[in-house]
Image (cartoon, grey):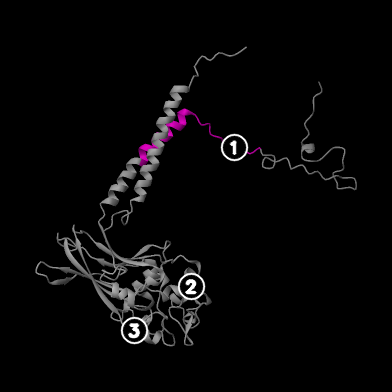
C-alpha cells in the first residue's frame, strides 16, 4: 500500500513540476486557496436536538407567554372606550343632510348634533380621537407630497416649495404654504362635547387642544418661518392650500404657540397613518382634581361643524372616547397573540412528551450486533 505525502504548496495550487515564477509554461490553477474560509474549515456549532432540550423549551415558553398574554388581555379589557359614527350615510342620521349637501366647494359650514349615552363613567384622563375609514394615507404619492424643509421654516422652501408637492405646489402664481396633498386634505371638522344635566341644560365639557402632538414633531420637525413675530407678515407672498378656508397663520390666532406650522392639529394630521382605517388624537379631557369622574355616566350631545366630506371616496367618520393604560390604548391583539403562542408551545410540549414516552424503545444496555 503506497502512502501519499501531503504537500501544502500543491494544495495551494503550486505544483512542484511547474514553474512558480509565471513562466510561459506555467498553468494557473483554479483550485481555491488553502485557507479555512475558502476550504470551508471554519469552526461551526450545530445544536443536537434531543427530547431533553426540546421539551423543556416548549414548556418554558408556554409557561412564560401564557401569563404575560393574560395580563395584557386583562389590561386591554380594563380600558374604557366609546365610539360613535357620525358620517351621515343613513337617512335617520342627524348628519345626513350635511353629508349629502356638503362638498369641498361649499362656502358655509353645516352643523349637526349627535346624542349619545355613556353607561359607565370614565376616570383618569380621557382621550378624544377622530377616526377615518377607507382613507389611504399610505399611498406612495400621497406620503411624498410634502416639503419637510418648508415645514421646518426654511425661507427658501417657503417661497419655492419642493416639486414633490405637485399639483398642490402653487396657486394663482403664489407658492402654497403648507404645500402638498397631505396638508391640502387636513381634517377640519370641529367636535364639541356637552353633558346634559338632569334639569335638561347643556354643560360644555372642557378639553385641551395642546399636548396632542409628539414632542419631537412640535419642537424639532415643525417650525414657523423666522424674521417676524407676526405670522401674517412671515407668510406674506404665499397662498393657502386649495381646500382650506383660512390661511395657515389663522389656524389658532388666539394662541401664538399653537398657530402656523406648529399648530398641533396640523402636526397630528401630517403624521400619516399606515392603514386605511385609523384614528388620530383630537383633544384631551383632563382628569378632575377631586374624586369626580372625568366623564360621568349619563346623556351627552356632540355638536359637529361638518367641514370634511368623505362620501366621495366611500369613507366613514367617527369620534372615539378612550382611556389608556401603561400599554397604550385598547388593543387585545397583543394579549391574544401571547396566549395563542404560549398555548401552542405548551400543547406541542405535551404531545411530544407523550410520543417520547410511548415510542422511545432505547435502553441503557443496548445490545451491540455481531
Q: Position of residue 187 (x, y in %)?
A: 36, 72
Looking at the rendering, in which quadrant would you find the C terminus?
top right
Label 2 to label 3: alpha-carbon separation: 26 Å
Q: Is residue 347 shown left or right of residue 192?
A: right
Q: Is residue 193 shown left or right of residue 344?
A: left
User: Which of the two residues, 299 or 363, is positioned nearer the viewer here?
Assistant: 299
Q: Which residues are magenta?
A: 41-65
Mark linked to residue 107: 3
Q: Quadrant of residue 354?
A: top left
Mark linked to residue 44: 1
User: Which of the two residues, 332 or 158, is positioned nearer the viewer here?
Assistant: 332
Label 1 to label 3: alpha-carbon separation: 73 Å
Q: Position of residue 341 (x, y in %)?
A: 40, 42
Local packing at callout 1 (Cα closer than 10 Å; few below 14, some 14-19, many 20+) is few
Q: Which residue is mark 2?
A: 145
Q: Main secondary structure of the magenta part?
A: helix
Q: Nearer the viewer, mark 2 or mark 1?
A: 2
Question: Outermost residue, left direction?
Answer: 199
Local packing at callout 3 (Cα closer than 10 Å; few below 14, some 14-19, many 20+) is few
44 to 188, vertically: above or below? above
SS label for mark 1: loop
Local packing at callout 2 (Cα closer than 10 Å; few below 14, some 14-19, many 20+) is many
Disc count in the image?
3
Looking at the rendering, in which quadrant would you find the N terminus?
top right
Residue at 44% across / 30% down in the picture? 352
Q: Position of residue 208 (x, y in %)?
A: 26, 70
Q: Are marks 1 and 3 in contact (CB under 8 Å)?
A: no
Label 2 to label 1: alpha-carbon separation: 50 Å
42 to 221, vertically: above or below? above
Q: Is residue 302 shown left or right of residue 131?
A: left
- First-in-chain label (2 vs 1): 1
Amino acid at each position: 500500500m503506497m502512502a501519499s505525502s501531503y504537500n501544502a504548496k500543491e494544495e495551494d495550487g503550486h505544483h512542484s513540476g511547474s514553474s512558480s515564477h509565471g513562466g510561459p509554461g506555467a498553468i494557473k490553477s483554479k483550485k481555491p486557496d488553502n485557507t479555512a474560509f475558502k476550504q470551508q474549515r471554519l469552526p461551526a456549532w450545530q445544536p443536537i436536538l434531543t427530547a431533553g432540550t426540546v421539551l423543556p423549551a416548549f414548556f418554558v415558553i408556554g409557561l412564560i407567554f401564557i401569563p404575560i398574554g393574560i395580563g395584557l388581555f386583562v389590561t386591554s379589557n380594563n380600558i374604557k372606550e366609546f365610539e360613535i359614527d357620525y358620517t351621515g350615510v343613513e337617512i335617520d342620521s342627524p348628519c345626513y343632510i350635511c353629508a349629502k349637501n356638503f362638498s369641498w366647494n361649499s362656502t358655509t359650514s353645516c352643523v349637526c348634533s349627535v346624542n349619545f349615552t355613556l353607561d359607565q363613567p370614565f376616570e383618569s384622563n380621557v382621550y378624544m380621537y377622530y377616526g377615518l375609514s377607507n382613507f389611504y394615507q399610505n399611498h406612495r404619492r400621497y406620503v411624498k407630497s410634502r416639503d419637510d424643509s418648508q415645514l421646518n421654516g426654511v425661507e427658501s422652501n417657503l417661497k419655492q416649495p419642493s416639486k414633490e408637492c405637485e399639483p398642490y405646489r402653487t396657486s394663482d402664481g403664489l407658492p402654497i404654504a403648507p404645500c402638498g396633498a397631505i396638508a391640502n386634505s387636513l381634517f377640519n371638522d370641529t367636535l364639541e362635547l356637552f353633558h346634559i344635566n338632569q334639569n335638561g341644560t347643556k354643560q360644555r365639557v372642557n378639553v385641551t387642544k395642546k399636548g396632542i402632538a409628539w414632542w419631537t414633531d412640535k419642537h424639532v420637525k415643525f417650525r414657523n418661518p423666522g424674521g417676524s413675530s407676526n405670522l401674517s407678515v412671515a407668510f406674506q407672498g404665499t397662498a393657502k392650500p386649495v381646500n382650506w378656508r383660512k390661511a395657515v397663520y389663522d389656524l389658532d390666532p388666539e394662541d401664538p404657540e399653537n398657530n402656523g406650522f406648529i399648530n398641533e392639529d396640523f402636526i397630528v394630521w401630517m403624521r400619516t397613518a399606515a392603514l386605511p382605517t385609523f384614528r388620530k388624537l383630537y383633544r384631551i379631557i383632563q382628569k378632575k382634581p377631586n374624586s369626580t369622574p372625568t366623564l360621568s355616566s349619563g346623556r351627552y350631545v356632540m355638536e359637529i361643524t361638518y367641514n370634511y366630506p368623505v362620501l366621495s371616496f366611500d369613507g366613514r367618520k367617527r369620534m372615539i372616547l378612550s382611556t389608556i393604560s401603561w400599554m397604550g390604548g385598547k388593543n387585545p391583539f397583543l394579549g391574544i397573540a401571547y396566549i395563542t403562542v404560549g398555548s401552542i408551545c405548551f400543547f406541542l410540549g405535551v404531545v411530544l412528551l407523550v410520543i417520547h414516552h410511548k415510542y422511545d424503545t432505547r435502553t441503557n444496555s443496548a445490545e451491540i450486533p455481531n
